Amino acid sequence: MSDFITVAAVDDIEPGYAIVVEVDGRGIALARLADGSFRAIDDLCTHDGGPLGEGEVIDGRIECPRHGAHFDLTTGRAVTLPAVVGVKAYEVRVEGDSVQVRFGD
Ligand code: FES
């Protein structure tokens, strides 16, 4: 069972930036790429718990603000040290003015 849940409005995020949204107590880093598309990954860096949604969006990646590891925003893969383990990535869609993230299996 899985569902798309509205987490933000399209206009809440400028291209090239990210925000943090909370769904059922889970922090999600919601990013908008330069092309205007959206990506969602867990907000918790696997290195030492840094808030990924407060990081800088760089070419489809986000940089952890704590020690600088990069994560791929589409796959959640840890791209650079010091993180070696990836984070969960979520499917995202836009419905009208709403940005929706798919939770569940
Ligand atoms: S907590 Fe993210 S790189 Fe260290």
Image (cartoon, rainbow, N blue to C red):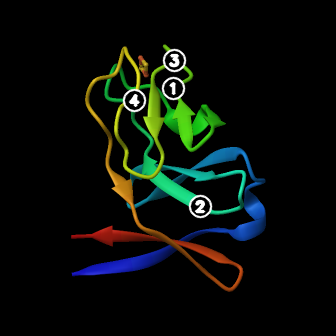
Residue in the picture at 65% in, 52% down = 33
* Residue 102 vertical position relative to residue 78 in the rendered view, above or below: below
Q: Which mark is residue 12?
A: none
Q: Quadrant of ligand 1?
A: top left
**How far is mark 2 from mark 1, CA to CA?**
18 Å
- Quarter where residue 46 is shown: top left
Cβ of mark 3 under 8 Å from ligand 1: the answer is yes
Residue 36 place in picture, x, y as percent = 71, 61
Name the residue beneath numbered marker 1: 64
Give the mark nearer the N terminus: 4 vs 3.
3
Q: Is residue 10 left or right of residue 2?
A: right
Q: What amino acid type is highlighted by mark number 3?
A: Gly
Q: The residue tagged with tag 4: helix, strand or loop?
A: loop
x, y percent for residue 8:
63, 66
Could you tell me which secondary element the residue under label 1 belongs to?
loop
Q: CA distance from mark 3 to mark 2?
A: 21 Å
Image position of 16 with respect to 40: above or below: above
| Element class at badge 2 | strand
Identified by mark 4, the residue type is Val
Q: Say whether marks 2 and 4 touch (CB < 8 Å).
A: no
Residue contact at pointers 3 and 2, CB within 8 angstroms:
no
Q: Residue at x 41, y 67 (%)?
A: 91
| Label 2 near ligand 1 (CB < 8 Å) | no
Mark whose residue sits in front, 4 or 3? 4
What is the crowding at mark 2: few (fewer than 14 residues within 10 Å), some, or many (at least 20)?
many
Query: Is tag 3's residue or tag 2's residue first in the polypeptide sequence?
Result: 2
Residue drawn at the location 37% of the way across and 50% of the way down: 75
Residue placed most toward the observer, 89 or 59: 59
Q: Check residue 38 in the rendering and tell me which mark sits there, or answer none.
A: 2
89 in relation to 72, above or below: below
Residue 79, labelled with which disc? 4
